[in-house]
Amino acid sequence: MKLLYIVNRIDGPGGLERVLSIKASILADHYKYDVHIATLNQNSDELFYKFSSGITYHDITAKGNPLVHAYKYATGLRRLVKNLKPDVIAVCDDGLKGFLVPKIIGKPCPMIYERHVSRDAVIKKGKKSIMTKVSDGIKSRLMNIGGRSYDRFVVLTKGNLNEWKFKNLKVIPNPLSFYPDEQSTLQNKRALAVGKQSFQKGYDRLLKSWKIVTQTYPDWILDIYGTIDKSQQLDQLAEQLGVTKTVNFYKPVRNIAEKYQEASIYTMSSRYEGFGMVLTEAMAYGVPCISYDCPYGPSDIISDKEDGLLIENGDTEAFAEGILTLIKNEEERKTMGVKAREAVKEYLPEKISEEWDRLFRSLTNTDS
């Protein structure tokens, strides 16, 4: 089966890139799919994550003003699809143009849309100006029109089903990046967070909670790994809160698995999520997680007070109390870690890839 993934770029350290590297590689190597990946203005052969050598890459160049850019992208994409003649197309593009791909190229074969973030990533809530309301209204209508054009619209969590009113919805979670033989000892006085610095990840909230934690446990350290964005002013906030000596900001690293193994607590302070793959990665190392019960993902992954802790979204004091609970109670921390490691087996790559294979074959009417 010839499978074409349409994405933006795959050379970065993001979650979408990591997920695609796992499932596309398994489909190519184990299921013997003829996998192709179309990128936009990537212009680089160096990938952050390891992809199968059996995958073929196609980069579409589209530059210029918005109209010229859109024309070149549409033309390049139509040409590529016409030449490749794929059996199925999967679009992994969380931007607005991802919804419009069936309108751009038509429907030459069964098409699937993969949504990796919450609808809130495009349609913001809260007080809005008139222009913002108009813009959000247009975006919302385009997403609804485009989403219904796909044969299947795949989301990552049960909660995500509430965001869309389509009949073509299906839930397939992200696969685990790894399931190691070894696990964390949970003895190091280190808490961990992984993800790019952004409003979504809520590190400002995490730092406020961490200030409360350090008042009781000044010897614990919080390590935050992810693309650094100076506009978030997290360094300044850490200084204002007086936690600079106990907080480290690091750029993304390829050996992030080692950081999970060194941690004793994982913290996720996101305002909203598409899934929360970092939670499953930490749990695979037996590290108990504390997360805001944000839309969507954490409540699918964590069983509250069993293998981790879920906190009301935005309650920084309760979040701090949750961290303090895990620090104080070593036996509870270890018990949660054991249960967490067992719980995430349902996200093993071979299980998730099998779901994708069944979906592709059902849409193309081919036998396994």
Image: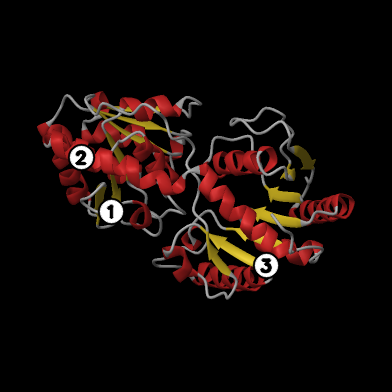
Mark yes or no: residue 97 visible: no
Residue at the disc numbered 1? 303
84, 207: nearer the viewer: 84
What count of labels does the image hold?
A: 3
Mark yes or no: residue 177 visible: yes
Q: Residue at x 67, y 55 (%)?
A: 91
Res 208 quadrant in image: top left
What amino acid type should be assigned to the residue bearing mark 1?
Ser
Q: Is residue 127 left or right of residue 8?
A: left
Residues at circles 1 and 2 in contact by the CB criterion of under 8 Å: no
Location of residue 103 in the rendering, given as x and y in whole percent from the top left corner? 76, 67
Disc number lying in front (2 or 3): 2
Label ID, residue 150:
3
Residue at the disc numbered 2? 335
Disc number lying in front (1 or 2): 2
Question: Mark 1 or mark 2: which comes first in sequence?
Answer: 1
